Image (spheres, rainbow, N blue to C red):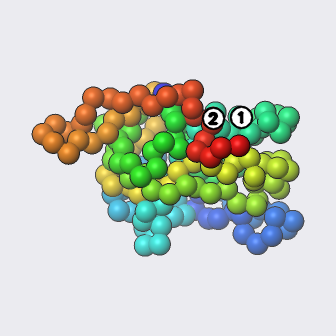
């Protein structure tokens, strides 16, 4: 498993009608991001906003993005266009809904709370390809609450789940990477 891309933006790019085109905003693709418990991703548009405390970070599987492009018969999409904070490879992201999980990319575990789907918006048909919006439903990622502070960086990733008992973490649980592109809804 690995983190293949990170994206942070101070502003929303997809406002108004897709026919008007996205707003011109700077979106950074840093090698690492800083997370603060109860706050979110430092420097991101959702950080520190009470309405987004349970959705301050979004994660999507690269395989899901690639699968949608293949199904549409178009070249691979730039994952930054989905505006998700973290893009992973080898992680069945959709299975993390409703689950507390620790991600560790080398700087120690960061506790996140998997909450609701990161539903795609109609903009996906305009910025990716016609039909992308519908195909991304159920596999556009998951929104997470940032429950612990730490750093995530591009590169190898380990996933563990907090225990309710004596130890800090259960044994590492590897989710089925073959399901990363499938998503959560039947097609």
Q: Dot 1: what SS? A: helix
Give the residue number, with chain letter if any, for mark 1.
67
Mark linked to residue 181? 2
In the figure, residue 26 lies in which quadrant? Answer: bottom right
Q: Earlier in the sequence, mark 1 or mark 2?
A: 1
113 or 109: nearer the viewer? 113
Q: Gap between marks 1 and 2, in whole Å?
A: 6 Å
Q: Residues within 10 Å of mark 2 (few under 14, many from 20)?
A: many
Q: Is residue 4 visible?
A: no
Residue 70 picture location, percent across and down = 78, 33
Label 1 with label 2: CB-CB less than 8 Å? yes
Residue 177 picture location, percent across and down = 53, 28
Residue 51 picture location, percent across and down = 47, 72
- Residue 102 is left or right of residue 86, and the answer is left
Task: Report the number of numbered marks.
Answer: 2
Q: Which residue shows up at 57% across the image and 26% down it?
A: 178
- Residue 13 is left or right of residue 2, and the answer is right
- Residue 66 is left or right of residue 92, and the answer is right
């Amino acid at each position: 498993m690995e983190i293949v891309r990170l994206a942070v933006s101070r502003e929303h790019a997809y406002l108004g009608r897709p026919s008007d085109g996205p707003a011109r905003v700077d979106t950074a693709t840093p090698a690492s991001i800083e997370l603060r418990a109860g706050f979110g991703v430092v420097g991101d548009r959702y950080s520190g906003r009470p309405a987004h405390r349970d959705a301050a970070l979004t994660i999507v599987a690269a395989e899901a993005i690639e699968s949608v492009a293949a199904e549409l018969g178009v070249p691979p999409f730039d994952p930054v266009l989905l505006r998700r904070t973290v893009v992973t490879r080898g992680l069945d992201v959709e299975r993390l809904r409703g689950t507390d999980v620790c991600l560790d990319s080398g700087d120690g575990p960061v506790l996140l709370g998997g909450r609701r789907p990161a539903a795609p918006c109609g903009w996906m048909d305009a910025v990716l390809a016609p039909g992308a919006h519908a195909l991304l439903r159920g596999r556009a990622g998951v929104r997470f609450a940032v429950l612990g502070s730490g750093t995530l960086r591009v590169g190898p990733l380990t996933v563990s789940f907090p225990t309710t008992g004596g130890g800090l973490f259960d044994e590492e649980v590897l989710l089925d990477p073959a399901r990363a592109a499938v998503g959560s809804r039947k097609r």
